[in-house]
Image: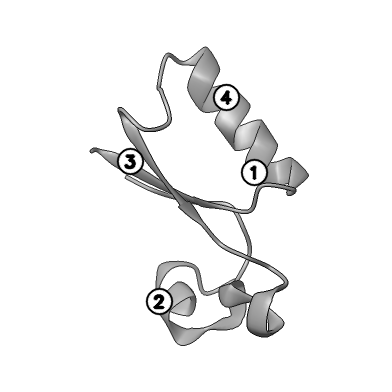
Amino acid sequence: MPFILYSYCKSSASWRVRLTLALKGFTIGKQVEYRAVNLVKDGGEHKKDEYFALNPAKLVPTLVV
């Protein structure tokens, strides 16, 4: 898959990225791999070192191309 979207389901910014991908003809699960980032669990998965390596701002969404 060419794209990986790290996202939180309730994030309005993530929703806008998913909408834009859909408008451009990309399908989650086919051309875009979806990886959930829980902002609540264990103090927030977006604050962990693994996510920091992807996005130093520690914000969602992150689209890896």
* N-terminal-most mark, 4 or 3: 3
SS class, disc 2:
helix
Residue annotated with mark 3: 3
Instruction: Give the residue displayed 40% in from the left and 21% down from the top.
Output: 26
Measured in 3D between alpha carbons, the distance from the residue under mark 1 to the one under mark 2, in whole angstroms, is 19 Å
Residue annotated with mark 2: 53
- Judge from the rendering whether residue 38 lies leftward or rightward of residue 53; answer left or right: right
Measured in 3D between alpha carbons, the distance from the residue under mark 1 to the one under mark 3, in whole angstroms, is 14 Å
Instruction: Give the residue displayed 73% in from the left and 72% down from the top.
Output: 40
Picture coordinates of residue 44 (x, y %)?
66, 77
SS class, disc 3:
strand
**Tag 1: amino acid:** Ser
Measured in 3D between alpha carbons, the distance from the residue under mark 4 to the one under mark 3, in whole angstroms, is 13 Å
Measured in 3D between alpha carbons, the distance from the residue under mark 2 to the one under mark 3, in whole angstroms, is 17 Å
Mark 1, mark 2: which one is toward the viewer? Answer: 1
The C terminus - image quarter: top left
Q: Quadrant of residue 18?
A: top right
Residue 14: mark: 1
SS class, disc 4:
helix
Residue annotated with mark 4: 20
**Tag 4: amino acid:** Thr
* N-terminal-most mark, 1 or 3: 3
* N-terminal-most mark, 4 or 2: 4
Picture coordinates of residue 16 (x, y %)?
67, 33
Measured in 3D between alpha carbons, the distance from the residue under mark 4 to the one under mark 1, in whole angstroms, is 10 Å
